[in-house]
Amino acid sequence: MRANSLDVKFSLGLAAILACILAGVLLGVRQDIEKTKDSIYTHVSQMTREDLKKILVANAIQIGSSIKAELEVALDTVRTLSYLFGASVEVSEYRDPVFNRTVIPKTQIEILKKFPHWTYVYSQWAPDAAIGWDANWRGLSNHDAQGRFLPVAERTANGYQSRTDHLATLESPWYTCPVTTGKDCLTDPLRYEVAGKKQLMTKITSPIYAK
């Protein structure tokens, strides 16, 4: 009976030792698995971040190129208009110049029609800089109370119209920038209300030169 008791104790002790060894092995295996999982997760996560970064950079480049192309088209158009309008002032001594205060607003509307994503096409003239004296145009369409020429072509619910830009001042950034620098200018995008909706809009301007 005593031998049996020793055998049982020995068996139990051996079982306990084996259990401890097995637990240690399992613990070691578990730790290795966790380390492997962490390593794989870190690697995959790193790959994911790198891939995401590459995708975002590629998308940003594509969007940037698209925006640049759109701005270049707008800038080329605005620059060409400024050349034409400036030339009209230089030949104003002729009886029938190509562009004058009645033709310019119509020209701006036609340009706006060709670019559906544009909001406005406008020209902002310094006092007495347009063809003819401002005093003769006071309060008329496309002019302010002093006769300054400020035509704005815009879309309406029924089509297009040309109106006076009553918000234009000699301190407006889209006016002072090309005047003071003599260069094409691009204003920072700001939110404006257009047709009852808030839209992000930037303004491209070019100086009108006349000798």
Image (cartoon, rainbow, N blue to C red):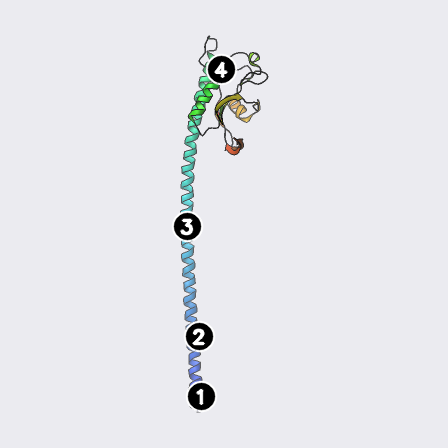
Percent position of residue 81, x then y: 45, 20
N-terminal-most mark, 1 or 2 = 1
Percent position of residue 152, x then y: 51, 22
> Disc 1 and disc 2: Cα gap in Å?
22 Å
What kind of residue is marked 3? Thr
N-terminal-most mark, 2 or 3 = 2
> Disc 2 and disc 4: Cα gap in Å?
100 Å
Q: Nearer the viewer, mark 2 or mark 3?
A: 3
Q: Quadrant of residue 107?
A: top left
Q: Are marks 2 and 3 in contact (CB under 8 Å)?
A: no
Q: Is residue 110 visible?
A: yes
Q: Nearer the viewer, mark 2 or mark 4?
A: 4
Question: Residue 102 has which mark?
Answer: 4
What kind of residue is marked 2? Cys
Helix, strand or loop under label 2 = helix
Question: Residue 5 has which mark?
Answer: 1
Question: Residue 48 has which mark?
Answer: 3
Q: Is residue 173 above or below residue 135?
A: below
N-terminal-most mark, 2 or 4 = 2
| Residue hosting label 2 | 20
- Which residue is at 41% across, 58% downward? 39
What kind of residue is marked 1? Ser
Q: Quadrant of residue 73?
A: top left
